[in-house]
Image (cartoon, rainbow, N blue to C red):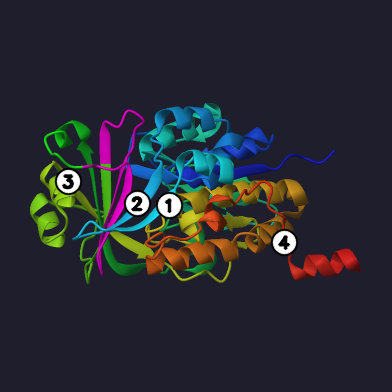
Amino acid sequence: MTKTPRIAVIGAGLGGAAAGALLQQAGYDTRVYEQAPAFSRLGAGIHLGPNVMKVMRQIGIETQLAEMGSHPEQWFSRDGKTGEYLSRIPLGQQAREQYGASYITVHRGDLHELMVGALDPHRLHFDKHLVDVDDRGDKVTMHFADGTTEDADIVIGADGVNSRIREKLLGKEAPTYSGWVAHRAIISAEKLKAYELDFESCVKWWSEDRHMMVYFVTGDEKEYYYVTGVPEPEWNHDSSFVESSREEMRQAFEGYHPTVQALIDCTETVTKWPLLERNPLPLWHDGRLVLLGDACHPMKPHMAQGAAMAIEDAAMLVRCLKEVATEQHQEAFELYRQNRFERASRVQQVSHDNTWLRENEDPAWVFAYDVHDVALQYPATAIEEQSA
């Protein structure tokens, strides 16, 4: 009888939590290691398109997410200064009928809490900061900052843009600062009632070199969130984000529409984050180590698909492990990369170009995708072996 492999997931972010939940659900002996000391409601807003909600369905939390999230009827793109509509992309019921699931916006922390709750709590380990990993051929030994070590047969690096697993595979290399920053703030919708303006449930305000994406993050529409993309030549801060201010926001969006000015006026606290990228990596796996999400394809958030790609990665990796069997993990890893590289790279490029839904276009190539049903594309070597 084949021994069930022990799988370790490094990082309990959205991609790591998805991988852990799906692996545990499939019966794999899977442990998830997270460097944070405990779960907390971090982050702000996030879009979950039908492509992601299909994975949430598999995990078993789609209904809860649909109940807590906001369901925009349309994605609007508007000229930042005149307010002219540049595009209207139908969502709501049309998304459910055409793409097979809802399109929602939700607080990232609420989503993360549900996903972490889908994990076996006895196999979720907090305060585990990975400092080194040693692939010994027959097993992998992980070394943590607290002095402990753990062994696994397969290690999945879901540890973000500064991934320790990626560094082990490819050496030290800092991600590239894109030249853009993102301001993030949550506003109490109660404050907006003082304005005789229309605060739409999902709208992106554009100008030539910057934008502001705005949407509700709760179904009761009490929290309104914005995230920006603003050029800033250099990032000279050691921290992952810094505090910003209303004054900085007014300067960045001077001359923008009165609705945007009202959002800035209602802002109590706002943070500023560097947007980091990497070029498509030459490899996603080696030996018993494999990467997913930001560890192998960090991208600007301008398509609202960065987390979606990590979650899709997780689902495809689990599918490929089941398809090939974990004893042939390298074949499973290559099948996974074969079926994710082109899509993730395309999303990475469109996110970089910041053109997504600025004009009316068909988003089906993103939203209609179903990671569980899409036909698998086999590497050429595997096809040759099957036909030999």
Residue at (17, 46) in percent of width and height: 263
Q: CA distance from mark 4 to mark 3?
A: 46 Å
- For mark 4, what is the residue? 377
User: What is the tally of numbered marks visible in this picture?
Assistant: 4
First of labels 2, 4 by sequence position: 2
**Of residues 72 and 46, which is closer to you in this image?**
72
**Residue mark closest to the camera, 4 vs 3:** 3
**Residue mark closest to the camera, 2 vs 3:** 2
- For mark 2, what is the residue? 76
Using the rendered image of the protein, determine whether residue 378 is visible from the camera's viewpoint.
Answer: yes
**Residue mark closest to the camera, 2 vs 4:** 2
Residue 113 on the magenta segment? no
- For mark 1, what is the residue? 89
Estimate how packed mark 1 is, as few (under 14), some (14 to 19) or many (20 or more) residues with alpha carbons within 10 Å.
Answer: some
Using the rendered image of the protein, determine whether residue 141 is visible from the camera's viewpoint.
Answer: no
Estimate how packed mark 2 is, as few (under 14), some (14 to 19) or many (20 or more) residues with alpha carbons within 10 Å.
Answer: many
Give the extent of the magenta segment.
198-224
Residue at (20, 66) in percent of width and height: 236
The x, y position of residue 150, in whole percent, is 56, 43
- Asked which quadrant contains residue 356, the reply is bottom left
First of labels 3, 1 by sequence position: 1
**Of residues 284 and 105, which is closer to you in this image?**
105
Residue at (39, 40) in percent of width and height: 72
Q: CA distance from mark 3 to mark 1?
A: 23 Å
Estimate how packed mark 4 is, as few (under 14), some (14 to 19) or many (20 or more) residues with alpha carbons within 10 Å.
Answer: some
Q: CA distance from mark 2 to mark 4?
A: 35 Å
State the SS at label 2: strand
Location of residue 288 with respect to 91 vertically, above or below: below
The x, y position of residue 149, in whole percent, is 53, 44
Is 293 left, or right, of 182 in this rendering?
right
